[in-house]
Amino acid sequence: LEKCPTCLRPLFSTDYNPTKIEKRIMRFILKFQKIEKKSPSYREIAVHVNLKGTNSISTYLYRLKRKGFVNFIPAQKRSVQVIKEIQE
């Protein structure tokens, strides 16, 4: 497992369970897609989960992609797709 040279923490989490906010993001994406028939924008996701910026959403989505829960095409608008639903 590769570690950060500064703080010596693992660069990638070995925990593949989504966090509470990641679960909220995924639930919102699924609900939005069901109603609107398209994926939400990063701004729409940020507003729903009470985050100020879209950069945080990008970080969460990359984490979810690495964990195998979502897929998207970088730099393409509204391309987020949930590929593995969360188990409650």
Image (cartoon, grey):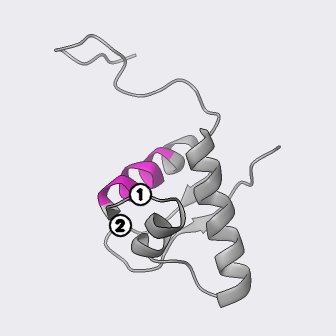
Which residue is drawn at the image coordinates 47% and 26% (left, top)?
13
The N terminus, quarter of image: top left
Q: Is residue 8 above or below residue 16?
A: above
Q: Amino acid at mark 2?
A: Pro
List the residue tagged with mark 1.
51
**How far apart are labels 1 and 2 at the CA level?**
20 Å
Q: Is residue 62 magenta?
A: yes
Q: Mark 1 or mark 2, which has the lower sequence index?
A: 1
65 displayed left or right of 30: left
Which residue is drawn at the image coordinates 34% and 60% (left, top)?
52
User: Which image quadrant for residue 51?
Assistant: bottom left
Q: Position of residue 3 (x, y in %)?
A: 30, 16
User: Which image quadrant for residue 26?
Assistant: bottom right
Q: Position of residue 16 (x, y in %)?
A: 61, 32
List the residue tagged with mark 2.
74
- Observer-side mark, 1 or 2, equals 1
Where does the magenta region start and end? Answer: 55-63
Secondary structure under the numbered disc 1 in the rendered image: loop
Sort mark 2 into few (<14), some (14-19) or many (20+) by Cα contacts within 10 Å: few
Which residue is drawn at the image coordinates 65% and 34% (left, top)?
17
Residue at the far bottom: name it: 36
Q: Position of residue 61 (x, y in %)?
A: 46, 54
